[in-house]
Structure formats: structure tokens, C-alpha cells
Image (cartoon, grey):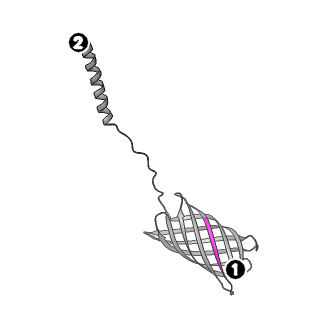
């Protein structure tokens, strides 16, 4: 009789354990939230650029400070930049406006501005670009511009910027 009670007790423990195992609660794996892009506000950045004029390439390093205003999917912005051209020794300073479409973690935009070189040459940069938010406060901007010199020269410029948003 004791053997029967012991066997019944062991069997009931196994059955309860099996029933509990059927109802195991397994937490789903954690999923990272996507980067929420906030393009509105001020930013500052570092720029590398290549100016191509008459078959000659002029590399440049620079800084920029800008601000964006976002309404829905529309972005309007303004930027001031300063660059040093490594091979020519020229500086340039420019003010550019931009308008574009916000696509969550990217912005596609067109730009128009006015700039001057330290040698006195003024020009109008007309461009287009795409900027990608890589963290909640850092973006990478890729831009191409056609430069219309007010004293007759024409050039193109390609640039990449790393921007920090406040």
C-alpha cells in the first residue's frame, strides 16, 4: 500500500510539473526602438569637400552652423559655413538656404546661397543633397553643388558633413 501511495504521489507531481511546463511564460526578445528623427532646431558640423574647376580638384575642410524649421514633412533651413581649401590656401564663407522633404530618418533637399572666397571671388552655390540621421542627435549630409561665379567662373563641389543636432 505504501508503494502504491508513493507511486501515486510521484505520478501526481510529474503531472503537475508537465501542466506547468505547458504554460511557460517566455518573454519576447527586446526590440530596439527605431531612431526617432527630430530635424527641428540648431546643429553644428564638420565638413569635407572637393571643389572641381577646370580639371583641378581643390580639397577643403570646414565647419558649419545651421538651423532647421520643420512643419509636417516640409523642412526649411539656413546655414552658414566656413571652409579652408588645402591646396590653394583660400578660405570661403557662405550663407545657404535649403528646402526639402522629411522622410523620417532622412531629408532630401535643394539649396541656394551666396558665398565668397578670400581672394574676393563671389559665387552662388545651387545644390541638392540628402541627409541621414544616424543617432537621435547626429546626422551625415551628402551634397552636390553647381557654383556660379559672379566674375565668370563655374565649378562643382561635392561635400560630406557630420552634423550634431541640439
| Relative horizontal placement of residue 69, taking residue 163 as reference (left or right) | left
**Percent of width and height locating residue 135:** 53, 57
Marked residue nearer the N-terminal end (2 or 1): 2
Residue pictured at 53% horizontal, 71% vertical: 77
Along the line of sight, the residue nearer the viewer: 17 or 61: 17
- Residue 137 placement: quadrant: bottom right
Q: Residue furthest top?
A: 1
**Percent of width and height locating residue 69:** 49, 69
Looking at the image, is 8 positioned above or below residue 50?
above
- Residue 25 placement: quadrant: top left
Instruction: Please tell me how many numbered marks the rendered image carries.
Output: 2
The local crowd at label 1, few if under 14, some if 14 to 19, many if 20 or more residues have their Cα within 10 Å, is some
Foreground: disc 2 or disc 1: 2
**Percent of width and height locating residue 103:** 46, 67
Q: Is residue 111 magenta?
A: no
Along the line of sight, the residue nearer the viewer: 11 or 30: 11
Looking at the image, is 99 positioned above or below residue 8?
below
Q: Is residue 156 magenta?
A: yes
Residue bearing the label numbered 1: 53
Looking at the image, is 24 positioned above or below residue 37?
above
The local crowd at label 2, few if under 14, some if 14 to 19, many if 20 or more residues have their Cα within 10 Å, is few
| Relative horizontal placement of residue 2, taking residue 57 as reference (left or right) | left
Q: Name the dominant secondary structure of the magenta segment.
A: strand
For the N terminus, the image quarter is: top left
Span of residues in magenta: 148-161
Residue pictured at 63% horizontal, 73% vertical: 158
For the C terminus, the image quarter is: bottom right
Residue bearing the label numbered 2: 1
Do the residues bearing badges 2 and 1 touch, measured as CB atoms within 8 Å? no
Residue pictured at 31% horizontal, 36% vertical: 22
Helix, strand or loop at disc 2? Answer: loop
Amino acid at each position: 500500500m505504501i508503494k502504491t501511495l508513493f507511486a501515486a504521489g510521484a505520478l501526481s507531481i510529474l503531472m503537475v510539473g508537465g501542466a506547468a511546463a505547458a504554460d511557460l511564460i517566455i518573454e519576447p526578445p527586446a526590440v530596439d526602438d527605431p531612431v526617432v528623427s527630430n530635424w527641428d532646431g540648431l546643429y553644428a558640423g564638420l565638413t569635407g569637400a572637393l571643389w572641381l574647376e577646370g580639371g583641378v580638384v581643390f580639397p577643403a575642410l570646414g565647419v558649419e552652423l545651421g538651423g532647421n524649421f520643420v512643419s509636417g514633412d516640409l523642412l526649411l533651413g539656413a546655414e552658414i559655413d566656413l571652409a579652408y581649401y588645402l591646396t590653394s590656401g583660400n578660405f570661403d564663407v557662405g550663407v545657404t538656404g535649403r528646402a526639402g522633404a522629411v522622410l523620417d530618418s532622412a531629408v532630401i533637399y535643394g539649396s541656394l546661397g551666396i558665398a565668397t572666397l578670400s581672394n574676393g571671388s563671389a559665387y552662388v552655390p545651387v545644390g541638392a543633397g540628402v541627409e541621414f540621421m544616424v543617432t537621435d542627435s547626429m546626422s551625415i549630409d551628402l551634397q552636390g553643388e553647381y557654383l556660379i561665379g559672379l566674375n565668370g567662373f563655374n565649378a562643382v563641389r561635392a561635400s560630406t558633413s557630420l552634423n550634431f543636432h541640439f
